[in-house]
Amino acid sequence: MSDALDRINRQIMWDRLQAVVEEQGQTLTRAAFSPIVRECGDISAGIFDMDGLMIAQAVTGTPGHINTMAASVGHFIKHFSPATMRPGDIYMTNDPWMGSGHLNDFVLVRPCFLDGRLIGYNSCTSHLIDLGGRGTGPEGRDVHEEGLYIPMVKLVDQGAINETLMDIVRANSRMPVQNEGDVYALIACAEVGEERLIAMMREFAIDSLDDLGRHILETSEQATRKRIADLPDGAWDHELRLDGYDFEIALKARMVIDGDTLTVDFAGTSPVSRFGINVPITYAQAYTVFGLKCIIAPDIPNNAGALAPFVVTAPEGSILNPLKPAPVSQRHVIGQLLPDTVFGCLDQAMPGRVPAEGTGCLWSMVMRSMIGSQADGNAPSFMIEPVHNGGTGGRPSSDGLSATAYPSGVMGSQVELTESTCPLIIRRRELRPDSAGDGEFRGGFGQILEIEHSAGAPFMLGSAVERVTYPPRGRHGGHDGAAGELWLASGAALPAKGEKEIPAGDRLIVKTPGGGGYGDPARRDVALRDADRRDGLVTGGTS
């Protein structure tokens, strides 16, 4: 085959691989029971070579799942010898240090067989709503308080599900039906991935992924290294201050570019917290690299090759590298702010290409019934984790995005679906006026929500949100965005982290942060200012 035809053939096979992993992801979201998976897309799916290196990943998914999954498969191969694997086997864990950073994420790995011969693996992850313990709040003092801890186990043995394990999962949940349904959705995702991969290989008459995988990974790594090599060598430092829980947090990053390798070291970052906002290193690496790649190489496929040129380290015992059994339930609260942290370094190395700071972490809040509150029969038991987002930072050539999740990419929970799956009513959900930081390109707007129990009963709120004390900062003269707020309609301010009761007859008021502005506000287009005023998004003299 000529070189030109060989390149065309490989491109077609690459496109087919993308279709395979995307069908995996769609199978998972469509079959899932939990709204955070089914509607918000809190998942990942991918295909891996014989060495456990990620070749392709579904577009549907979050960096916290995808880039941690990229590291997880290697752990499974070390734990379970490939020689013992059989067709129909599926392995699973929710170990935060081997998987996606907290107990609520299940990681599955399925060995893929062609004519009885192992040719690679597929993997998938998703968020389960409840695994017992203290739930998904940050109050746990070690990981064992946070819920059911499952080591690496065989979930499916040659097509037969591990019923004992499923009994344990059901027994350790306040929402057993949703959890069981989500596990079966993960299994379906893994099965579809193998079926479609084998069909693709038969269509192209290949009996191994080795050559194709090697080409994909080498091409991606070379392209990424070239992008890094085009940047100036040097070292740059940046610090981001955060609200924290038991103490305010400093995230300190030093970024070093040396030829075609980029290293980020978080030495000097705050120590481990007593509460569950600590970030396992695998999750810290996932979001740091994602932020770097968004600016440096956004168009290069995300796989093991493209990830290889980035090296991320943090001291053991820091909040970005806690040792087991530190509490980690809400690791996303700090972990999703790591792109903003390294953006401060990147802006010095490549000015004019990096946005202002945004909300960063998801404003996901667990709401559940109170024990004893259903005595009158009008307040059914429930538990739900709706996800809402703030504004992103203004960009070098355009405004920030409103009520949009970056860097997670998780879609906001819909009002109708929240109300149809639990006894809550969302009385108000709208963009938050005057929350965007002013600038030549303003930040995105946050949003306002008012939530109450449909029967007027009390309910519990478990929150772990950021940007309440330290709002998103503007860049290059842009103004800061508005800080986030939590209130009761009766007038009391609520703390950003921890569990609290929403009293009977009262309402929870949520105001998510706005993104910081980019550039001198005096340079903002008058027509853009006028449009924001007409839309009611700006009520004062500036945007």
Image: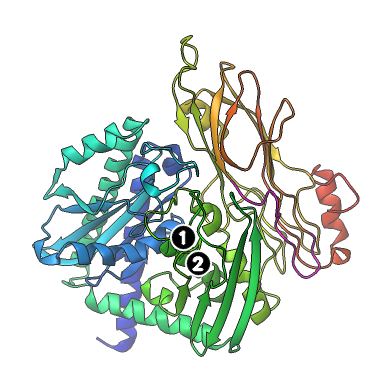
Amino acid at dot 2: Phe
Asked if 287 appears above or below 483 in the picture, the reply is below
Inspect the magenta stretch and tell me whether residue 195 lies in it. no
- In this view of the protein, can residue 350 be seen by the observer? no
Residue 24, image x, y percentages: 32, 53
Residue 308, image x, y percentages: 40, 77
Asked whether, in this view, residue 542 is left or right of residue 409, the answer is right
The N terminus lies in quadrant: bottom left
| Residue underneath mark 2 | 290
Asked if 524 appears above or below 328 in the picture, the reply is below
**Quadrant of the rendered image containing residue 477:** bottom right
10 Å crowding of disc 1: few (<14), some (14-19), many (20+):
many
Residue 304, image x, y percentages: 37, 73
Among the two numbered marks 2 and 1 on one chain, the one whose residue lies closer to the N terminus: 1
User: How many numbered discs?
Assistant: 2
Inspect the magenta stretch and tell me whether residue 467 lies in it. yes
Asked whether, in this view, residue 506 is left or right of residue 269, the answer is right
Label 2 close to label 1 by CB (< 8 Å)? yes
Residues at marks 2 and 1, CA–CA distance in whole angstroms: 7 Å
In front: 325, or 132? 325
10 Å crowding of disc 2: few (<14), some (14-19), many (20+):
many
Q: Secondary structure at mark 2?
A: helix
Looking at the rendering, the stretch of residues picked out in magenta corresponds to 465-479
Residue 527, image x, y percentages: 85, 57
User: Which residue shows up at 52% across the image and 83% down it?
Assistant: 227
| Residue underneath mark 1 | 63
